[in-house]
Image (spheres, rainbow, N blue to C red):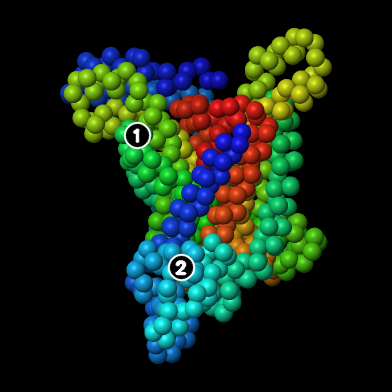
């Protein structure tokens, strides 16, 4: 077990809540404290650091795709000799069936794939957080309704849930994003609900209530800062699976549409050229998804060990 | 025990009813007119929209539609053939009795399509589980016993790769290496016996192997730290016996819990793996159905998968109480 659990910082935070209630919030002091330990812990975690560093490089490369990619990702070369060329000095990852530069497409595609993952999980977190806080804090009928609703949503495996949503809305990148978001939301709501149940009975909540704080104030100012660490951990790990699901939907033809470069959609194109041996159309976009997802997982595992050792071994992602 | 069983069974039924409402509502959440969207895809003559709307019961009030969909027209009067008279009772049996309606594209009963395609998916899913379970558990045990040795690091690196590798890419790469380069198997031939099952099974099983290995390892490490393990060792019990009788038995409980969930994951993952390998299962069927916007077929398949998933989890729960008596009295 790591030597210090951040959740153990509670007793120190509780008096602060009483002292500084109207102007300041109890969470702030505690999270500063907490971030100090997190940083220290993370600095010692070489795997997480490596994952984070590579991830940063990948994000930088994809965000700068416009200026660093050697070719236009959509431009089809006029030169017939550029058809399905294996990787070489000019086309680092070869060219595809429409004489486009695969390297440029991988760079641009990453922008789409990674932002789909981040945006859909951010949306899932905001809704899941609100539902989970309400269910856990108010309990009773509200909790029953929300929890049963979550049970039902969790009955369908994420990819099936995403498929149902795409069926309703039709194929397309935005719909795929929404689908991933809806499919990931229940996990966050569940997690936050559980944490809220624990937090709401702690003394700092009681003292805040005794001072006449509103439900709203208690939920957002006191409980939220204390449940946020597990949300960050699960959120990070979930971005990894969101990228996989979103790329999977595009691979199935339900997400990003041609000619838009996206890693999953590129794989689906490359699939047609596997048999004839043009491996580069498939290898590079897939490798990109793989490395990105692996780095996020490394970072997420490191964050989990640093922020929330309770979650270790539960494989919430 | 019986009370617990009944409670769990009731909960499963309630959840399935909820899922049915969700999936029923699906068609009504489609922006625009679902019938027009569906018909847009098939060639339709004049009056076709009216006909299909009647056929799907879409001209009825919502609660009535749901009942009709759920239990058929034994109890709900519906006119689906347009003769201004209610249909004779029992022409539609409702999803509870396996009548999911007709596929719009395939001109066949949805239930027949499911019956036709599910065996292939089941075969693939079970094969993947049979591969993942022993490999994952063994890897996890070895990693836990030889904690912080090369064994452990290699296993955990493998597990990281397993959860991170996109299944569709793994499938394509396996097919390229073994099908195209080495020519050991023929690529993209679907379900042609044992040999063609190997690569899809590995692809589908990879993430599950990784998750089971991680969980077994961490669960073993927890149990190895328990007092009763120390006591057993202090008594001089042989290490092999400590591991089998005390550690493994208890370490399996969390692994068992996720088995049901993993089955669900495998059923979902089959959608992608079947598409990659042109494997003729339910997953590939549903992808085609989505692209065709064949709502009755998608509804049928998702509801069917959800039911299988809930049943498996119910079964796992029962197994769980058998292994861990503490649950029964909780």
**Is the N terminus of chain A in the top left, top right, bottom left or bottom right quadrant?**
top right
Residue B195 vertical position relative to residue B206 in the rendered view, above or below: below
Q: x and y percent of residue A47 in the render? A: 56, 33
Give the percent coordinates (x, y) of residue A133: 34, 36
* Quarter holding residue A196: top left
* Total count of labels: 2
Of badges 2 and 1, the one in the foreground is: 2
Give the label on residue A49, or none.
none
Image: B330 above or below B230: below
Assess disc 1: are there few (<14), some (14-19) or many (≥20) residues with their C-alpha within 10 Å of its C-alpha: some
Q: Residue furthest bottom?
A: B46
Marks 2, 1 in one chain: no
Q: Which residue is mark 1?
A: A139
Residue at x 74%, y 41% (from the top left corner):
B135
Q: Secondary structure at mark 1?
A: loop
Residue tagged 2: B75
Q: Nearer the viewer, residue B119 or B217?
A: B119
The residue drawn where x is 42% and y is 18% is A8
- Pinpoint residue B34: horizontal percent, then vertical percent: 40, 73
Pointer 2 local density, CA inside 10 Å: few below 14, some 14–19, many at least 20:
few
**Residue at screen point 32% across, 29% down:** A223
The secondary structure type at the circle numbered 2 is: loop
Q: Is residue B234 left or right of residue B36?
A: right
Task: Find out whether the residues at labels 2 and 1 contact each other: C-beta distance under 8 Å.
Answer: no
Residue B150 vs A93, above or below: the answer is above
Pointer 2 chain: B
- Can I make out residue B306 in this image? yes
Residue B227 in which image quadrant = top right
x and y percent of residue A284 in the render? 58, 57
């Amino acid at each position: 077990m790591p030597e210090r659990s951040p959740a153990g910082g509670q007793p120190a935070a509780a008096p602060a809540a009483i002292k500084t209630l109207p102007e300041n919030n109890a969470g702030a002091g505690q999270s500063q404290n907490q971030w100090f330990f997190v940083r220290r812990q993370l600095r010692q975690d070489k795997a997480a650091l490596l994952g984070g560093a590579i991830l940063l490089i990948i994000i930088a490369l994809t965000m700068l795709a416009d200026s660093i990619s050697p070719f236009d990702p959509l431009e089809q070369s006029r030169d017939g000799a550029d058809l399905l060329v294996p990787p070489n000095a000019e086309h680092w990852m070869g060219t595809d069936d429409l004489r486009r530069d695969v390297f440029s497409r991988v760079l641009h595609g990453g922008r789409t794939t990674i932002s789909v993952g981040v945006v859909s999980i951010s949306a899932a977190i905001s809704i899941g957080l609100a539902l989970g806080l309400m269910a856990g804090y108010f309990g009773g009928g509200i909790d029953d309704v929300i929890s049963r609703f979550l049970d039902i949503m969790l009955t369908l495996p994420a990819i099936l849930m995403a498929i149902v949503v795409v069926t309703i809305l039709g194929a397309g990148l935005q719909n795929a994003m929404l689908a991933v978001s809806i499919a990931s939301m229940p996990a966050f709501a569940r997690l936050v609900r559980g944490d809220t149940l624990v937090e709401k009975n702690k003394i700092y909540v009681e003292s805040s209530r005794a001072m006449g704080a509103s439900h709203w104030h208690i939920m957002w100012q006191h409980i939220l800062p204390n449940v946020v660490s597990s949300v960050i951990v699960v959120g990070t790990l979930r971005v990894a699976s969101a990228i996989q699901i979103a790329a999977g939907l595009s691979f199935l033809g339900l997400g990003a549409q041609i000619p838009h470069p996206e890693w999953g959609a590129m794989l689906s194109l490359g699939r047609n050229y596997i048999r004839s041996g043009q491996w580069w159309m498939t290898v590079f976009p897939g490798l990109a998804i793989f490395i990105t997802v692996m780095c996020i997982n490394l970072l997420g595992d490191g964050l989990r060990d640093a922020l929330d050792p309770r979650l270790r071994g539960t494989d919430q992602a | 025990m019986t009370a617990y069983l009944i409670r769990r069974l009731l909960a499963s039924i309630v959840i399935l009813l909820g899922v049915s409402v969700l999936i029923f509502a699906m068609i009504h959440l489609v922006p625009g007119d679902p019938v027009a969207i569906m018909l847009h895809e098939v060639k339709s003559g004049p009056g076709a929209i009216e006909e299909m709307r009647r056929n799907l019961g879409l001209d009825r009030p919502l609660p009535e539609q749901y009942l009709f969909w759920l239990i058929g027209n034994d109890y709900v009067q519906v006119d689906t053939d347009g003769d201004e008279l209610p249909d004779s009772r029992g022409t539609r049996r409702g999803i509870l009795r396996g009548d999911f309606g007709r596929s719009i594209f395939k001109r066949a009963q949805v239930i027949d399509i499911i019956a036709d395609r599910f065996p292939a998916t089941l075969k693939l899913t079970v094969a993947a589980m049979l591969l993942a379970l022993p490999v994952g558990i063994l890897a996890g045990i070895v990693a836990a016993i030889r904690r912080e040795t090369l064994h452990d690091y290699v296993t955990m690196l493998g597990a990281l790769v397993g959860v991170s590798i996109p299944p569709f890419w793994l499938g394509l790469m396996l097919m390229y290496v073994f099908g195209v380069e080495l020519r050991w198997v023929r690529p993209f031939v679907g379900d042609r016996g044992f040999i063609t099952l190997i690569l899809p099974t590995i692809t589908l099983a990879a993430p599950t192997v990784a998750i089971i290995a991680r969980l077994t390892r961490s669960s073993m490490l927890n149990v190895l730290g328990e007092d009763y393990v120390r006591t057993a060792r202090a008594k001089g019990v042989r290490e092999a016996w400590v591991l089998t009788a005390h550690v493994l038995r208890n370490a399996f409980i969390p692994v068992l819990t996720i088995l049901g969930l993993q089955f669900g994951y495998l059923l979902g993952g089959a959608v992608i793996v079947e598409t990659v390998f042109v494997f003729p299962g339910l997953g590939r069927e549903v992808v085609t159905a989505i692209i065709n916007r064949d709502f009755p077929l998608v509804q049928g398949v998702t509801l069917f998968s959800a039911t299988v998933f809930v049943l498996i989890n119910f079964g796992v729960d029962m197994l769980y109480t058998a292994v861990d008596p503490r649950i029964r009295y909780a």
